[in-house]
Amino acid sequence: MEQSVILEHEGEFSVGRIDALLRELKSRLKDLSITRLYAKRIYSLSVECLDNIFKHSDIDLEEHPPTESHPAFFRVTQIDEKHFCIRSGNLTPAINEHKLQDRLSELESLSIEQVNELYKKALSNSEISEKGGAGLGLIVMTRISGQKLQYNLKRVNPDWVFFDLTIHLYPKENR
Amino acid sequence: MVTFYKKETKTTPEIRINSLEHCFSIEGISRPENVRTFYGETLTALQQALTEHADAAAPFLLSFKMDYFNSSSAKFIADIMMVAKEAGENGVSCKIRWYYNQEDEDMLEVGEDFSEMAGIEFQYIMIQQ
C-alpha cells in the first residue's frame, strides 16, 4: 500500500484546535483495520506531541519568534499496513536547547528496559512545571513506541531552535 | 466528613471521594488543560479523607478505572499512590484496585509500574468487552 497522511495540521495550536484534531484522529483511526490497542498507542503518542507543541505555543511574541518561517506542525502518516509515523515540530527558546538535547541523548543511550526504569524513577521524582509539564513526555513516547526517537534540533537564529520530532510505531512483535 | 466530586468531561476523569464510604475512585480520560489545579484539589481532599479514616476498621478503597491519561496526569496519579502509601505507613489500611480493559495490556503494565513505584500491592481487575 502507498503511504497516506491520516491527519495533519500546521500553524496555530490552541486548546480548541488540539481537541478538534484529537477528535478527528480518533474518528479516522476507527476506520482503519488496526486493533484498539494499536489505535490507542497512536492516539497516546499524538497527545504527547500536541501537549508538547501547546506548552510552547504561548511563547512571548515580544521575543519575535520566527513562527512565520517556522510554523509548528503535527502529522500522522500510515507508512504501510502496520507502520505509522507521528511527526511534530515547534519552536523553542534556544535557552532550552541543551536541556532538551541532554534528555534526548540520555533516552537514545538507554535500552527499553532502562527507559522503563527511568519512567518509574521520574514518576516519583519529577516536579510539574508552571506549564504543566512533568518532563515525562519524551520518556512516555519512547516507552509506547519501543523505538528510539528521531529528532532534529535546528538553530533558526541565536534565540530560537526548531525541535523536529519523529516517532515510528510498529506492532510489538515487529519491534 | 469529606465528600468530593468532579464530573467527567471530555478531557478530565470523574473523581469521587467519600470518607463515610471509605472510598476514592477515578474513572475516564485525563488530559486536563491545567493539570496542577485539577489534581491539586483532589490530592488535598484525599489527604483529608485518609486522615479522617485513621481510626476506621474498614480499609480505604482506591479504585482506578482509567481509559487514558497523558504523561502529566501520570505524575499526579503517582502522587495519589504516594498519598495512599504514606497513609499506610501511618496505620491507615488502603486497598488499590486497578481496572484495565481486556484489550489494553498497556494499562495493565502501567498499573504494575505504579504498584512497583509505590511499593503497594494492587488488585488487578480485567474488564471484559
Image (cartoon, coloured by chain):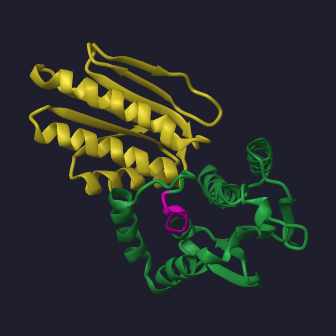
Chain colours: A green, B yellow
Name the spot of residue A35 as percent of width and height, x first: 64, 53
Q: Quadrant of the N terminus of chain A?
A: bottom right
Q: Which residues are magenta?
A: A134-140
Name the quadrant containing residue A48: bottom right
In magenta stretch: residue A135: yes
Name the foreground residue: B117 vs A43. B117
Which residue appears at 68% of the width and 58% of the height?
A: A46
Name the spot of residue B74 as percent of width and height, x first: 45, 50
Which residue appears at 81% of the width and 65% of the height?
A: A73
In magenta stretch: residue B43: no
Q: In the image, is B4 to the left or to the right of B88?
A: right
Name the foreground residue: A150 vs A155. A155
Name the foreground residue: B126 vs A28. A28
Q: Does B7 appear above or below A31? A: above
Is residue B47 at all visible to an observer of this figure?
A: yes
Name the spot of residue B20 as percent of width and height, x first: 26, 13
Q: Does B60 appear above or below A25? A: above
* Count of numbered circles in the view: 0
Name the quadrant containing residue A153: bottom right
Q: In the image, is A112 to the left or to the right of A23?
A: left
Q: Quadrant of the C terminus of chain A?
A: bottom right
Name the foreground residue: A162 vs B88. A162
